[in-house]
Image: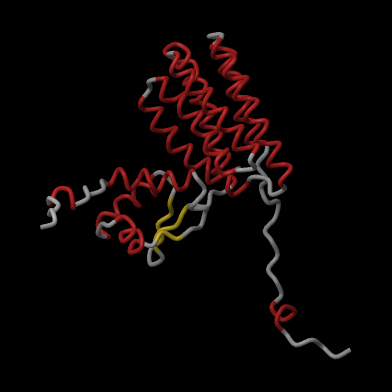
Amino acid sequence: MPAVASAGAAKQPAISDAEIYDRIVSAILDHHLPPGTKLVEDRLATAFGVSRTRIRPVLVRLANEQVVTLTPNRGAAIAQPTEQEAREVFEVRRMIEPTLVQRFIDRATGADMAALVACIDEEEAARAANDMRRAIRLSGEFHFRIAEGAGHQTLLRILRELTSRTSLILMTYSPTQARERYEATACGCREHRALLDAIRLRDAREAAQRMVDHLTRVESHLHFPTAEAPQPDLISLFGAPQPA
């Protein structure tokens, strides 16, 4: 007679709201959910095996963090940041990340340093493989690990939100030409290594300045449209050709 699995073994543990949130944020950071993607509640509920009432609070939380937009009668979608929002994100990051890196220097262990090295190594490998999505995510992880090691929970939460929004900004405004994307990402790796050198020397002032310079350079590589694209002329597009 075949063995009967216990009820506990057959039933999967319910996913928490925090796990749903984390998986959506991870998908954004991995560029699987580009700006403008519609987040249909029914489909999310099916994907996570929960009711729609469990999905709604998660989307509200993401909307409060400006990662998702909620529009009446149209539902939720991944946010599409404006140029002003992008500028503000980098401005705030330049305010808080020098403080975080200085606190990291005061508290960092050998394991913390090793984690930063691993991030940079993986980022360079992703760049070499032309996997820009992964390179951007690892770049964000490098900054987030510094924030974790700094031990400032409030700034850590703020940076987590800003990292998600930065990923959307880079997806929206990064250079379209392959060569420019390659150079921008390569510079990021070199600057991370230069920042790590200052951290290893326990030079808080130099590390803070390198952090500011790095974030400024990343912002400088964004390409914002100078004018709204002209609307196509529908008559010319679809009309019958005129006789010669």
- Examine the image and state in which quarter residue 190 appears: top right
Look at 51% across and 23% down and name the residue there: 116
Tally of numbered tags: 0
Q: Quadrant of the N terminus?
A: bottom left
Look at 68% across and 51% down and name the residue there: 225
Color theme of the render: secondary structure
Q: Where does the image place residue 150, in percent across and percent down from the top left?
A: 42, 20
Judging depth in this view, the residue of 8 and 101 nearest the camera is 8
Residue at the outermost left position: 1
Q: Where does the image place residue 156, in percent across and percent down from the top left?
A: 40, 29
- Examine the image and state in which quarter residue 26 appears: top left
Q: Where does the image place residue 240, in percent across and percent down from the top left?
A: 75, 88
Query: From what the image shows, is residue 134 above or below residue 108?
Result: below
Query: From what the image shows, is residue 87 above or below residue 55?
Result: above
Query: From what the image shows, is residue 235 above or below residue 125?
Result: below
Look at 48% across and 53% down and name the residue there: 33
Q: Quadrant of the C terminus?
A: bottom right
Q: Where does the image place residue 208, in percent across and percent down from the top left?
A: 56, 18
Look at 38% across and 20% down and name the residue there: 151
